[in-house]
Amino acid sequence: MISRIFFLRHLPFLALFLFLLPAAAIGREKSSSDEIINFALLDIRGKYYEFEKVRSRTLVLFFTMNGCPLARQTLPKLRDLASEFAEKDLQVWIVNSASEDDRKSIAQEAEKFSPGALPVLMDESQGLASFLKVGRTGEAIAINTATRKILYRGAVDDQLSEGAKKPKPQARYLHDALKAFLENRKIDRAETEPKGCRITFDFASEVASTNITYSTDIAPIIQSRCVACHSEGNMAPFAFNGHKKVRSISAMIQEVVLARQMPPWHADPHYGSFKNNQGINREESRKLLRWIEAGSPRGPGPDPLEEKVLTNKEWPSGKPTLVVRLPQVERIPATGILDYRRINVKNPLTNDAWVSGVAIRPGALEVVHHVIVRIKKDGRDHSSDDHFLAAWAPGYTVSEFPAGTGKLLPAGAEFEFEMHYTTMGREQEDQTEMGIYVLSEPPARQLKAWMALQQGLEIAAGDPDSQTQATLHFPRDTVLYDLFPHMHLRGSWFKYTLLHPNGKKETLLSVPRYDFNWQTLYRLKEPKKIPAGSWILATGGFDNSEKNPHNPDPTRTVRWGDQSSEEMFIGFMNVAEEKK
């Protein structure tokens, strides 16, 4: 005991006792031969990092938590390691997997104990640490990105051990393993014992003791976050209609949750609050991932997923006042790239009408990429900012306009349906419908569609982050309701920033991982009052590299255009100007 006290007093951080515990890894069942599934994390600034997009030969994950003395003292070693090896050979990510550390406190920790250029990422669900069976901070895991296999895991070196700290390391485990791998030599020691602070995993014991059950905890998450698409008659390829199906696909659920691909809600939760938030929160993802790791047990109780759900053949907001459909069946060929089809449809109403919402229902979900409906009068757009009536794309789930607002549908107008079809290997037929909900009296505010757009795009071949921006001025006091970013296949990230007249900047929405497959409208939980003289700054980036799996051709320079192989940059907004 005297010896231990002596050593503790002479270590620079009094909290060393947190990691001077038995060093056996907790529940480590994976071996270094196991394949690493895709995963994605945000850093403390909200930037998106995805394993499959790593461009170096090796990736090192170093697990930490706020206050861990070993982790703090190891940061300079990791900085030196990243400097020693070329960027094409090595990337190092610092990963905080502590259950209670949040973005603000992690950022404060990083400011005190500078990681330099190394990104500090947040494993908020603890899903990555749990999947990799990381039981302590201070563990480094080096991954061969080509084979997705672990080449080394364990301590960075042997400098710190129980009750002692050597003046300098005598064995540089991580460094030697990386050097051997990059020089195509055999790694002498591929695994060592990490000596860091124990990581507490939320919900792990609850699953084991059946306090988390499929019936009361897991099925409701699937029901609220997944079933709207993953059900009979809807767009997803299989239906979550009970425990048997969920369990059969649970390994894939684990991967898409870890990769932040599903559920398809891409807003950074650190900014803004949205009424139609379909994202899985931290507590839900932790429960779901722990349940899957426990073997996806059925357990007692009824199965909520066996209940009937709304299908694409029904109107989500109830029966519309009137239904307008394409005048004839549109035939879509089996293959090829198709031009947009612009189809005019007569408005059956003979008087001016105010509309409280519009729902678009595609007739052939497999080939309808998107639908935009505009109001045209005398063959022209109704006006510059209120001709846009409605849109549909996968992920665009809002059909009602914000409360107290409406759009004017003038007598004698026509609807122009902009139909973007894609081919899917066999001929299809479509006759898309539009349901219109008419108000009995004019609304308090007229809803208008504004946009900040940048048409002067020039995205260089191979550029992984070609950045651009657009602005929009607010000459009068205005209420902002919705934000709707739009890019194409190379779109990577998008952000809306409000620039107040007094110079203050406010992030309204950040989408760290833009996904063209999901055109999401983000409706503010509380409408935002924007004072006259403000500006909206829309910023974003395009990934035109070979690491972008959606990229049709990373060898060409890309400019503005209608087709998905070209690009757009539009920050749509639904607004209502205050009355003078």
Image (spheres, rainbow, N blue to C red):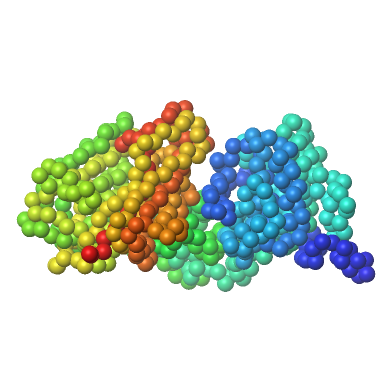
Does any portion of residue 454 appear in the rendered image? yes
553 or 579, nearer to the observer: 579
- The answer to which of 38 and 372 lies nearer the viewer is 372
Residue 267: quarter of image? bottom left
Q: Residue furthest left?
A: 350
**Residue at 18%, 60% in the rendered image:** 355
Viewer-side residue, 196 vs 191? 196
Q: Residue at x 58, y 55 (%)?
A: 44
Q: Quadrant of the C terminus?
A: bottom left
Which of the pair 260/47 is nearer the observer?
47
Q: Is residue 231 above or below residue 468?
A: below
Provide residue 427's location: percent of width, then percent of height.
Answer: 27, 35
Look at the image and tell me whether residue 131 can be seen: no
Residue 115 in percent (x, y) is at 68, 51
- Taking the spot 14% from the left edge, 67% from the top edge, the residue there is 440
Give residue 548's position: percent from left, percent from top.
49, 38
Residue at image location 64% in from the left, 34% down from the top: 88
Q: Quadrant of the N terminus?
A: bottom right
Residue 58 at x, y = what percent?
66, 39
Q: Is residue 186 above or below residue 537?
A: above
| Horizontal side of residue 65 vs 332, given as left or right | right
Is residue 555 rendered to the left or right of residue 153?
A: left
Residue farthest toward the top in the current orientation of the protein: 555
- Seen as rendered, the residue at the extreme right is 2
Using the rendered view, name the quadrant where residue 163 is placed: bottom right
Count up the numbered dots. 0
Q: Is residue 202 left or right of residue 229?
A: right
* 408 relative to 84, above or below: below
